[in-house]
Image (tube, rainbow, N blue to C red):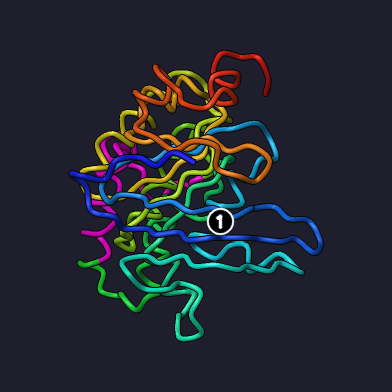
Amino acid sequence: MQTATQSAAQTLIDIKQLNLYYGTFHALKNVSMEIPEKAITAFIGPSGCGKSTLLRTLNRMNDMIPNTRIEGLIAVGGADIYSKEVDVETLRKKVGMVFQQPNPFPKSIYDNVAYGPRLHGIHSKQKLDEIVETSLRSSVLWEEVKDYLKRSALSLSGGQQQRLCIARALAVNPDILLMDEATSALDPISTLKIEELAQELKDKYTIVMVTHNMHQAARVSNQTVFFLNGEVVEYSDTEKLFSNPRDQRTEDYISGRFG
C-alpha cells in the first residue's frame, strides 16, 4: 500500500490495522492510513469496495448496523474513538456528516441550522441568530435565504438543500466534515458550488469525501485513496495518484478499464 506524504500537514485521523465485519462478511481488510488536518482527502473505487463503510467508521455510524464488528484502531486527535469512555454524541458533534441525498428536517431553514446548537444547550436567541448566519455564510447560502429563514427547508432546490445540510453540520463547530457522495444527486451547477465550497472550507475543517466521480477527486482533493474489495490499494497525493499511479490496479481503474 502506498501512503501519502505528510510532511507539511499534521495528521488528524490515524487508522491502524482496521478490520470491519458485517456478520461474516469481511468489509474492510487491514486498512491503515493517516489523514492530515485541514485538507481534502478523497476515497475512490468501484461500488461496494468499502469507501462509505470506512467513512462511517469515522463517526461511528456503523454502530447502528446490527452484527457489525470492528478490530484495530481509529484515533482522532490522538484519542481512540472506539474507547468505552467516548461519548458518541460528542464524537458526532466533532465529526459532522453530509449524505448523498440532501436530508433537511421538515422545519424552517432557521430551525434546521439551529437544531444542533439547541441540542447542545444553546438557547439564547442572539447566539442562535449569530450561529445560523455564520453557518449559512460558511455554506455560501446566506445571501439566497436571509429574507426567508422561516420558510420550510423543503422548499429549497436540491443544491440549496445540500448546502443547508452542510450549514447544519457546521453549526455545531466540528473539526471534521465527512461527505458521502454529497454531490451525486445534484445537477452540474450545484455540484460545482459544493466543490468550490469544499475548497473554501478546508482552510478551517478537515474534509473526507467519498466520490464515484474521479474528475471530482482530481479537481478537489489534496490526497486520494483508491479502494478495491475492502482494501486500500494506493494512497497518494492526488496529482501523483492520477498522473503516475504506482499500482497497475489503480491505473486500470482511473483509465476506465473496470469499475
- In the displayed structure, does residue 246 sit left or right of residue 149? right
Q: Position of residue 227 (x, y in %)?
A: 58, 38
Residue 144 on the magenta segment: yes
Residue 3 on the magenta segment: no
Give whichever of 1, 212 is nearer the camera: 1
User: Mark 1 highlights which residue?
Assistant: 56
Q: Position of residue 16 (x, y in %)?
A: 47, 61
Q: Quadrant of residue 3?
A: top left
The residue shown at (55%, 42%) is: 232
- Which residues fall within the magenta stretch? 128-153
Determine the residue located farthest toward the right in the rendered image.
Answer: 24
Can residue 77 be seen here? The reply is yes
The residue shown at (43%, 19%) is: 189
Q: Quadrant of residue 196?
A: top left
Give whichever of 22, 88 is nearer the camera: 22
Q: Quadrant of residue 22?
A: bottom right
